[in-house]
Every structure is written in C-alpha cells, then in structure tokens.
Amino acid sequence: MLSIKNLHASIEGNEILRGIDLEVKAGEVHAIMGPNGSGKSTLASVLAGREEYEVTEGEVVFKGENLLELAPEERAREGVFLAFQYPVEIPGVSSTNFLRTAVNQVREHRGLEPLDAVKFLTMMKEKMKLVEIDQKLLSRALNEGFSGGEKKRNEIFQMAMLEPTLSILDETDSGLDIDALKIVSNGVNQLKSKDNATIVVTHYQRLLDYIVPDFVHVLYKGKIVKSGTKELALELEEKGYDWIKEEIGQAAV
Amino acid sequence: MSTLLDTHPLEKILENPQKDFHSVRAMGKDAFLKQGLPSAKAEEYKFTNLTKKLSQNFDSFEIAADFELTEEQVNHAIFEGFDGYRLVFANGYFHDGLSSKIEGLTISKLEESSLPLGSIAKAEKDPFAALNQASFEGGAQIALAKNTQIDKPILILNFINPSNGNLIQPRIWFETGDFGEATFIEQQIQLEAGDYFLNEVKEIKGGRNSHIHWYRIQNEGKDAISMSNIETDIQQDATFTSVNISLSGHMVRNNLSLNLLGSNSEGNMYGLYLTNGNTHVDNHTNVDHTIPHAESNELYKGVLTDNSRGVFNGKIFVRQDAQKTNAFQQNNNILLSENATVNTKPQLEIWADDVKCSHGCTTGQLDEEALFYLQARGIGKDKAKGLLLYAFAGEVLENIKDDSFKAYCINLIQERLGTNLS
Amino acid sequence: MSKDNEILEEFTTKEYEHGWSVNYEADEAPIGLNEDIIKWISAKKEEPQWLLNWRLKAFDTFKKMTEPEWANVHYPKIDLQKLRYYSAPKQGKKPKTLDEVDPELLQIYERLGINLNEQKRLQGIAVDAVLDSVSVATTFKETLSKLGIVFCSFSEAVKEHPELVKKYLGSVVPITDNYYAALNSAVFSDGSFCYIPKGVRCPMELSTYFRINAANTGQFERTLIVAEDESYVSYLEGCTAPQRDENQLHAAVVEIYAATNAEVKYSTVQNWFPGDKNGKGGIYNFVTKRGLCAGDHSKISWTQVETGSAVTWKYPSCVLKGDYSVGEFYSVAVTNNYQQADTGTKMIHIGKNTKSRIVSKGISAGKSQNSYRGQVQVMKRAHNSRNFSQCDSLLMGDRCGAHTFPYIDINNPTAKVEHEATTSKIGEDQIFYCNQRGIDTEDAVALIVNGYAKEVLNQLPMEFAVEAQKLLALTLEGSVG
C-alpha cells in the first residue's frame, strides 16, 4: 500500500529525514518510535503533504501513485489521514459543518453521491459512539474550547468519518489520561481492517499496550535504525533510547 | 519594611531560633525581610489588606503545635458519601496512623536535604510564602510513583485547633512520576473556636503525561483568616486541574500559580466564591506559558451578598517562545446586595504573536427577567433566585470529576442559596 | 510562512470589481472650500435661506475645529482646498419620473447590479440612487406615498417637506459634533430622506445606493431617517467608487430619530474602492452615523459589512434616551492589503432599563490594520441598563494587525455590562488541517470566514446577506494559506 524509499526531507535547509525506507501493507499496524527531535512528526507531515518540508531525495508510492506529487487535499481524498499532534482550532466553523464539507468533497472524489443532512447525521451518530464523543461538542466550533483529550478523540472520530486507507496517528496518545487512552485505542482498533493500514507515531511505549503493532521501527536522527516486533518497544521502555544510541555508536566504530 | 511603626506581630515569629532546614529557612527569612509585609499600597494586595487585618485581630502569634486526634474525630469529619483514601493532618502535622495506606503513594515528613523546598513556590514572589518557608513546622512530602493511577480520590484533611497555637502553616510538597494520575480533595476542619491565621504553601510537580486534579473547599469558620500559596510545575503532555470553592471565612486569599513548562501541557483553574456577611475572598491566579503548544483555561465565578467582597486577579503571561498558546479566562460575578463589592482585574501580558487568548469579565445583578419568568411559572421568588444562582454556579462544579465530592459541594451550595440568600 | 505570502500575492492581484468609471457631462462647483462655494451649492440646490444660514454656521464652527488624531489610522493630511465639493451629471430639468432619467445614468446602476426599473426589480426594495453629489432617481415613491411614507432625495425633501427637515436636521448629530460632521453640515450636497408616519410599518426595504464617479470630488451626503411612534423601517445602504490613483474623501452624516415604540434597522454594505495592492488610491471614509432612541421602547439597530475604503473612520452609535430603548450594533469589518479601519460604536445609556448589544467581528489580512473602538456609557439615571459586547478579531497571515479599544464608563451601580473579546489567527495551520481532511483552500477560507461572520450576516436582509457573503469571500479569497 505504502512504499517509502530513501526519503530525505529538510526544513529551512536543515535535513531532518536522512533516508527512510518503509513498506506498509494493507492490514498492518506499524509503530514508529524515537526520542524527541528524531524526525517522527516530520515523517508524518511529509506524508500528509505539509509544504514547509522539502523532499530532497527519494520516493513515496501510495496505492501505485506518486504521493509526493499530490496536493494535501488530494492525498486526503485518496485516503491518507493524519491525526494531528496538535489538532488545530478553527473559530466559527462547527465540527459538523466542517466534517460535512470534508466528507462530501472526499465522496465526490471517490465518485459517490454527496450525503444529505439526514444521512450525514445518521452516520455521525453511529461513529460518535466509537470514541464516546458528546454531540454537544460537535455543534461547537471545531476544536475550540475542547480539552486536550477531547481534541484527540475528535481526531479519531474524524478518521472514522472519512474512512481512510492509511491512517497516520501523530502522537495521538500524548497528553491523554488512562481512561481517554483506552477510549482512543479502542476506537482505532475497531476501525482496523484487512484493507487499511495504520502508522502510529509515538514517543511513549505505553500506547502500544493498547494498539498492538505488527512492526516497531526506531527512528533516530532521521533514519530507521532498528526494526522489530512489539518486543522491541518493551526493550526500549526498559533500556531507554540511550541504549539505541550506544548501539548505533558501536556499529559506526 | 512594613508600613507599621511598631513591629508587626507576624514579624516577631522570625525572631525564634531555627530548629532545622537552616538553608531553606534562611532563604525564606531573607526573602521575607526584603519584601516586608504588604503595605496598603502594594498592588498585589491592594484590595486585601491582610497586614492590617492581622495586626488588628492579633496581638501576638505562636506557631501552632501538633495535637492528638482520634479515629472518631476523623470519621466524623469526612463528608457523607466519600469513597476514597484519606491523609490526616493536625495543624499541618501529618498523622500517619490515621491516614490510609495507598499503593504507589509514599508520604513522608519533609526532609531537610532531599527536597528543593521553595524552588516551585518561590519565597521572593510573596511575603507570606516566604514567612511559611522561614517558619513552617510539620508538613509532608507526597510522592506518586511512575505509571501509577490512584483509582479513588485522596482526601487531605487538616484539623485545626487554635488553642495549640494561632499561626498554622501547613506545607506540602507533591510530586508525581511520569503517567501518574491522582485526584486530591483538600479541606480544613476547625475543631475548637478561636482566632488563627492559616498560612499554607503547596508545591506541586507533575511528571510527563501526568494528570492531577486538585480540589479545595474552604468552608471554615466565619473568623478564619486564611492565606494560601499553591504553585505547580507542569511538564510535557501533563495536565493540572484546580477547582477551588470558597464558602466562608473572614479574609481568604488564594494565590494559585501554574507554570506550563512542557509542550502539550494543560493547566485548568476553576473557582467559585459564594460569600455573605463580611467575608472577603481574594483569588489571585497566575499562569505562565513558557513553551509553545500549551493551553490554559480559567473560569472563576462569584455570588456575593451582604457586605462581602470578592477580588479576582487573573494574570496570563505568555512568553515570547510560547507560540501556539491557547489561553482562556473568564470571571463572572453576581452581586445580590448593594453593599457587596467585586474587584476584578484580568491581566494579560502577551509577548508571542501566534497565540489565542481571550478574557471576559462580568459583574451584574441577577437576571430580573429570568427571575420574573420563573415566578410567572409559579415558582416562589426565593426558590427562583436559588435556581438561577445554582445554574450560574453549576458551570464551575461541572469540572469536579469526583461524584461524591461534587454532590457534597452541590449540597452545601444549595443549602447556602436556599437559606442565606433568601 | 512562505505559503501565506505566496497565496496572499495571488490574492492581491485581484482587481476591485467596481473600479470602472464613465464619462458624462457634469455640472461642477469650482475646486476649493470657502463661503462662496457653500453659497454656490446652496443656490444650485435652490435652498431656502434658513438652510444656507445653517450651512454657514456649520462652516464657522468647522473653521474653529481641528482634524481628530486619536483614531488608529495613518494617512497624509487631506488638503480640503484641493477638493471639489459638488459634481452632478447634467440632466437639464430634474426628471419627474424614472422614465425621464437619462438612460446612460440608469445604465451606471445597472452595471453595478442595481436595476432602477421598478418592473424589473425584485419587489420589496425601494432605491434612492445617489451619483456623486446628487440623487438621480428614487423608485417606488408613489407606492410609498400612499402610506404616508416620504422617501426621496434630501434636496427634494428640503423643498417639499421643509418643516420636517427643519425640525430634525442636526437634532441627532449637531453641527458641533466633530470635524467631519461640521464639514458635512456646511457642504453636504444630497442624500436620502425618509419619514415613516405614526403607526406605519414600511412594507419594503428602503435603500440608497451611493456611487462616486467624478474624480477629485468629495462626497458629502446626508441621510435623515425619522420614524414616528409605533413605526418600523428597514433601511439599506450600498456604496462603490471607481478605481483612481488619488484618494477621495467621503464624509457622510446619517441621523436616525426613533420615537416611542419605533424601530429602525439600518444596514450598510460598504464597498468603496479600497486602493490598489500597494495602498495607492482609495476612499477615505470618515462617516458620522448616530441614532437617537428618543421615545420609550424604541429600537435602533445598525448592521454593517465594511469591506472597502482605504481608511475607514466610523462609529454608528445609539443614544438610548427613552426608557426601555434598545440599541444594537453588528459589524463585520474586513481589511486587506494596506487598508486601515478604525470602527466601532458608542452606546450611550441615558434612560432606565435600556439595553444595548454590540457584536463586532474584525478580519484583517495582508498588511492591513483593523481596530475596534467602542464605548459603552451608562449615565447616572440609567437604572438597570444592560450591555453585552463581543469583539472578535481574526488575523489572516502575520503582517496585519488587530486592535481593540473598549471604553466602559459606568455611572450607575445597577448596570450590567458584559464584555468579551477574542483574537484568533487563521494561517497555514488551519488551512493545512482543512486540506488534510480533503477540503481545498478556497472552500476552507469561505467556510471559515462565513462561519466567523455568521452572527452579523444573519442580521442583514436576505438579499443583502447573500451579496455580503459573496463580497467577503471575494475580498479575502486566497488571502491565507
């Protein structure tokens, strides 16, 4: 589904990603871990098409298409979903209105009829249950006055509404208390299918107790330095990132 | 130093020889002497002249001593419906035997060398914090282990007995490891009548992705003079939520400061003051946004009647680096009598350019039209008033996550609205 | 913020839609400002002596005043001696009916989307069309006169209803009020007059469409609306001007008088030429608008959508004199490029149980500066008066500015005054967020701006609301990224 080869990206002349290779197949969950500043969020942003990042080398193929050539909204319509690390507040625009515009633009792209108000609301009600989000929240301006946990839940709710094929969760767990973490993970797990894939970006191992990954990759200084299974995450938690740093240091010698 | 010609009785406290915590106390004393007790003109104490009040009400001060408590006294003091753990203090001294043993939570006496006391609640910022640092007795260190979520709320009960000394200075240092989650409820219980000055300091340090709720209810005696300094450092991905309910006392001053030190951190401050008689409640809050992507929310509401006075001073400080800050502040007041007063002062200092800040304050009477509407539907005037005021206060109470404590507060508030405000 | 700038540039190349002008033979006063010019204007309009005297008195007052400098706007000093104070299309005799109006003039309005032909027009709106210094046509006069409603040009009112004009002119905005109001009082050329008699609910929207065509000409119109006891009227005002390199001055005065139980709704969509993308040219819009709620239970409501003008200086206000009277102010002010706006309102509570509501939404883009300046004053005997103010600012991009100057002055302890303010920013982050959910940039901006301004746009009459919404989208199209 997603194939990243030798991806290099920089911002304002500073190279952040220095040759990422990653293959993601349908039905898989990949976790990308790494210390602060290792390039995790940059990778998520580059995949979603944030323009401050310049791709200097490499390729990203998504469902057979060159992803890097598409505008952010085209990527979204093709099925790439980014759950933002810092969900943005948009004053004056209700979540409902926002989502209806988004859902219908995505549907149009996929050759589907736009949803009328009734069908849309029915769909919304159904998906709301998934992340236990309050309807009152959705009539308010998007993310405005939402608590940190509510914002993150709203991201997963939007994910449920837009039915993406590739979901990238950028630090969706950070800032959540244990109850909210359970709700969010449960939502993500229920949305998982054999046809879609999930990339979970996090700096805390704890999330992976709830969203169990098939693969764990450690990102350090813009490269994937170690890949493995769930056990790698536990090892990381126990030994800390210094262990990886040391190991790499030794390999280089 | 102070504006008084004679030495203020509080200042005499510092003449006592130091027993321990030499360096900490020396710093506190130094900071106290530098600032002096706030004069009538001091901006921070402009509407709350504690210095004068204390010298009027007290000829001398004596540092309160510990005293014996019984299991029965403790059980009697715990509010109805409470389901959780308890930590018991007497005049600020910790009573291990009467307190719950909580897994993952360690409570010990403040120890001289292990803690940087005064590094969070800085003595140089407030003379009363300095006084506490120079002369506190007892106190406790509470530590919550990493990855530990305490399943039930923890009730901190401080029993007050002024006959064992009229200067009561509790001090708590609370610290969590990463991912720690706990809810505290704090209450003072006065056992015997008598004047006293309660001067507390709490320093709170949350680990990464920790979630702390800190609730306080102030319903001490009509004569209580109470001063508190609570300051908390909030790290990356962590939240701290404070709910402060003030229902009585003679002069109450709460300083609450939140330092947002890590990205994606969140600080919430909610407060309700319901005052009557001559009660004077002053809430000074301060939130310091030091890093990008942090959020603060603040809502304080007041209902004032008789000759009571409410003061609200809310400072939001957004440093230059703190881009993408979200800061909200709201203060609403209802005055029910002509002699009740409110002084409200939002203070926004914003040095970053990509931030979202809003503030609002209102002071007014009860909505006469809404009142009339309810009366027109057959609801008696007093009852209608109570209903409207309760609805007004409700917005603050919604932020209490523990049902038993919320019910207790609602009960107290309804009782107050039903009887004293009619 | 590179993308912000890129898209901003894309937007700034957008042309002002109404920037064209036409050539017609004009009847013009000589350039300059002095007593003779005032006498010239008065003679041209065949005014009675009392009105000339009033003008001259205003001119005397004006000469003793200096230009106000407290507003948060900056522009080079205007040389009032270099302006022309009267310019009118030559029409021979004043046309009695629409059929007699020069078709070329009607075409000007048609091109602006204002059809003055009654049959072709949507029912329900009567229009007074003002071109430069004079009113060229007023529609539905007959229909309205059957109800006793007077709706005509100001000049006509002076001739046909001198007693009404004499009674109310300057009663709400006295000549001494401020520098530009005094200037207007001395040199005003035309405008609309509207009188709703006791107990009449005006069945259609009344509207004036102001158009500046001539160069080097100031427009100084004067509008007077009088609503007698128990009457109601909704009044609309629209404005455009050609694109010219030099700045032009527009200093209008609007006075509204509302008697007991009367209600007046006054809506403006202001789209004067804002200047080009480099800040060259554009209208200086220095306007005094005030309503007097003279009677008990009267209500005056101002709604404005301000998108044009290089510099705007405007504070539609309400003097709440009658007990239980109500004043409202709803405003969306959009500035882009080098535009400057200092706008807001004054609510003066004099009577008991008076209420006012202020909703101001500022949107700044480009390098523009947008200020809200509002005053809420509660006088000593205004028991139980109430005010609610909400001032929101929306910044688009990082080179513009938003400023809020609320003045709250309470002299009565029973007053209830609420003030809320927010400042938020729309930038790359918000747009990227929308993009990531599949919404393209144009739609995202429209979604955001219309959502933000909704509360104000809802106050406009239907037809105007649609126009205003389009105008907002047009003014801001592509201004963020």
Image: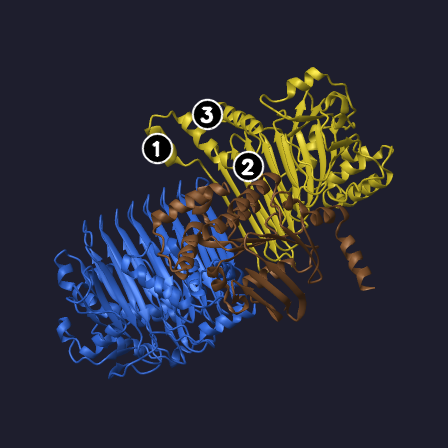
Chain colours: A brown, B yellow, C blue
Q: Where is residue B181 in the image (x, y as percent from the top left)?
A: 66, 37
**Residue C229 versus residue B405 in the image, above or below:** below
Task: Identify the residue position indicated by label 1 in the image.
Answer: B373
Tag in front: 2 or 1: 2
> What kind of residue is marked 3?
Ser
**Residue B324 versus residue B11 in the image, above or below:** below
Graded by Cα atoms within 10 Å as few (under 14), some (14 to 19) or many (20 or more), the crowding at tag 2 reads: some
Task: Identify the residue position indicated by label 2 in the image.
Answer: B399
Q: Is mark 1 on a helix, strand or loop?
A: helix
| Mark 2 / mark 1, whichever is N-terminal | 1
Query: Would residue B169 appear left or right of C217 to someone viewing this image?
Result: right
Chain of residue at mark 3: B
In this orientation, does residue C3 appear? yes
Q: Is mark 3 on a helix, strand or loop?
A: loop
User: Could you give the CA–CA distance between mark 2 and mark 1, rounded to whole angstroms?
Assistant: 29 Å
Query: Would residue B70 appear left or right of C481 to someone viewing this image?
Result: right
Q: Depth check: give the residue in front, B135 or A150.
A: A150
> What kind of residue is marked 2?
Asn
Q: Position of residue C213 (x, y in %)?
A: 30, 78
Task: Identify the residue position indicated by label 3 in the image.
Answer: B422
User: Could you give the CA–CA distance between mark 3 and mark 1, rounded to whole angstroms?
Assistant: 18 Å
| Mark 3 / mark 1, whichever is N-terminal | 1
Q: Are marks 3 and 1 in contact (CB under 8 Å)?
A: no
Q: Is mark 2 on a helix, strand or loop?
A: loop
Query: Would residue B250 appear left or right of C348 to someone viewing this image?
Result: right
Q: Where is residue B381 in the image (x, y as percent from the top left)?
A: 39, 26
Q: Quadrant of the N terminus of chain B?
A: top right
**Residue C290 versus residue C199 in the image, above or below:** below
Q: In which quarter of the image is residue B233?
A: top right
